[in-house]
Structures are given as C-alpha cells and as structure tokens.
Image (tube, helix red, strand yellow):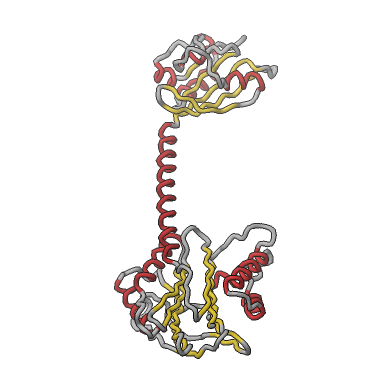
Amino acid sequence: MALSFNQKGFVQENPDIKFFLEIIDGMYDWVRVIDKNSNIIFINKAMAEALNCHDPGRKCHELIGREDPCENCISRKAVFNGHPHEKEEIINGRTFSVMSSPVRDQNGEIIAVVEVLRDVTQMKQMQQKIMEHNRNLQNDLEMAKKLQYSLLPDEFFDERIDFSYFYKSCEMLGGDFIDIFAIDGDHIGIYIADVSGHGVPASMLTVFLYSSINREILSPASALDELYKKFNSSNLGNDMYITLFYAIINLKDRKMTYSNAGHNVCPIVFGRNRFELLRVPGVPISDWVNRPSYIDRSISLNPKDRLFLYTDGLIELKNSEDEQFGEERLLNILLNDMSKPDLVLNKIYEEASKFSAPEKPLKLADDITMALLEIK
C-alpha cells in the first residue's frame, strides 16, 4: 500500500509512522515532501503554520508564493540524478537554506523528494555584519600600515656616507623599526628597534618610539634613559617592551658613540682588516627596573668602514631541516661583498630566502630589518 501523508487513517493504523511524523512536526525547521510531479504531499507543522497552509495538495513553487516553477529547482534535480542538492531561497523576505534529498521505495526507485528548509536569515545578517566589520578593520589596518611606513626613513643623503636599509614585516603591521636622521651639521643619529609582539600593538609601540626619542641629545645613553622614563609614564604595561640599539656618528671626526637597550643581536663595524661586534649591556625599554643605567661607548670609524645593524628575524630563518640561517652565512656575505649597501642588503635577503624557502615564496615568522651604512 502506497503511503499518502494526508491520509490520517493510515497514520493512525501505523504507530511507527505516527511517531516519526510527530518528530518531524516538532522540528523548528520546515519540512515538506514533494512527489515526482512537484506536488506537495506533506508539510510539517512549522511550515504549515508559517505559511498558513494546512492542505498540502499544491505545487511546490506555489507554496512559497511563485507562479512558475523555480528556475533552479533542486527537487527536480534530486529526482533526476538521485543525489541531494542544496540552495538558498528567499521566502517572504527571509533567507532559507534548502536541502532536497530523494526518497526511495523498497525497490530503490525514487518516489518523492523530502526538503528541509532552515531559516538562516539571522546568520546571513550576522555574516554581512562580520564582513562589513572585517572590511572596516582591513581599511584601518591599511591606514595604520601607511602611517607606520611613512615613519620609516626616506632616502637619507649625506655626501659623507652611503646608507641603505631593508624592511619586511611578517604581518601587515610590523614590530621592527629603523630610523636615521640629522641632529646637526656634523652629527647623525641611527637606531634599530624590535618591539614586543606583532600587529597593531607592536605598530603602536613603533609610533611611540618614533615620537618619543630625543633627537637632539648627543649621548645615546641619555636619550635611552629619557625614553625609558617616557615609556613608564605612559603606563604601557609590563608585557610590552622595546629593544633598541642607538648610535650617534660625528661625521666630522668619524667618531661613533652608541648605547644599547637590550637589543639581542650585536651591530657590526667592519672594513679593511677590521671586524668588531658592538657589545654593550642594557635593559629593554620597559617597566622592569627602576634605574636601567644605560652606558655610552665610542669607536673611531675609518673611510670605507661599514656599520651593519639588523634584527633577529634574519638569522632565525629556518629551512626544512629546522636549521637556522645563522650568523655565519650572514657574515660570509657581508665580509665578501663590497657592493653598494643596497645591493648587499638585497643579496642577503635573496640568500636567506633561498635557504629558507628554495622553491616557494618566503613566509616570515618574524620581521626582518637590516641597515648598512658606509663611511666615505
């Protein structure tokens, strides 16, 4: 005996069928059964009450307010190829996710299609809000990136030096920073920094650094001490900090004075028959101690001497065997390539990229920043 869902007597005589229909009637989702001729032979209680239709015998498209069959009728598709199909449908101004699945008899022949319609209007609205929020956030990040990049030095020209830098962040906003500037007619300041974290908080720290460091004091240690006090008066928190190497070069007598606030890779001075690591202790710009006690050290530079500054993101690049690029490979390039500073920096990055990702674009785990200054 074929089952006709609107024959109540059949349901009453079959308690198992009645039980399952009560389950379907208790569902929040809409459920309807459509025969092979697109006639509705059953709708559950939720759908009947929502559409004010308690007599199924209508075409499936008529129930949702259409005069003609849907152009993308997934019920016909389910009957034709015997597979479930899914689409979205707008009904009375609300969005529904519709799943049509074939129903087979005991012989495996398709006799109808069961459709489940779930109201996803609120979810779609939420998705739209999230997408709009993400677009706004992306625009904000783009603006923040432009601001951060605008603080990086333009081409710095002084006939007494040749200077170039390389900067690449692992995220849209970086935590590394480099700057060079004229203090007066004879002195220039140069510093490299690595702040805690990445993204927006890190970028804000670089903005703080740029706006707060004293560009007039001729003592790097004094400038760092002042910066430390400004950091603590800003209440930025003990989970944020800045490591910083700062040097001031007198281009008249070629004397360089430098100090360090916890920068963990030593800058290098090298030239003909010369190689020196600029080691000096110092506490990061933070709120970790009351008196950081920065100290100045000095070194005399000769014509053709070079100063190389960098952050640890470079030497910590790893290859597929978990081996780091390291200082030895870096020094091998620096000490054997006396090309112009910009060419040397590009070569270092190219070699590091080949080492870490020889067959695919390099994906950074940390920012990479380098600077190379040559005394003419």
| Residue drawn at the location 55% of the way across and 19% of the way down | 71
Name, please, the residue furthest toward the front.
159
> Could you say where residue 98 lies in the image, as x and y percent from the top left?
52, 26
- The C terminus is located in which quarter? bottom right
Q: In this view, does 342 lie to the left or right of 158?
A: right
User: Which is more toward the observer, 79 or 155?
Assistant: 155
Name, please, the residue furthest toward the left.
233
- The N terminus is located in which quarter? top right
Q: Is residue 328 left or right of residue 292?
A: right
Is residue 74 visible in this depiction of the protein?
Answer: yes
> Could you say where residue 348 lies in the image, as x and y percent from the top left?
62, 71
Is residue 227 visible in this depiction of the protein?
Answer: no
> Could you say where residue 366 lies in the image, as x and y percent from the top left?
54, 65
| Residue drawn at the location 43% of the way across and 17% of the way down | 48
| Residue drawn at the location 40% of the way across and 24% of the way down | 93
Quarter of the image holding residue 34? top right
User: Which is more toward the observer, 254 or 31?
Assistant: 254
Q: Please, is residue 248 above or below residue 100 in the view?
A: below
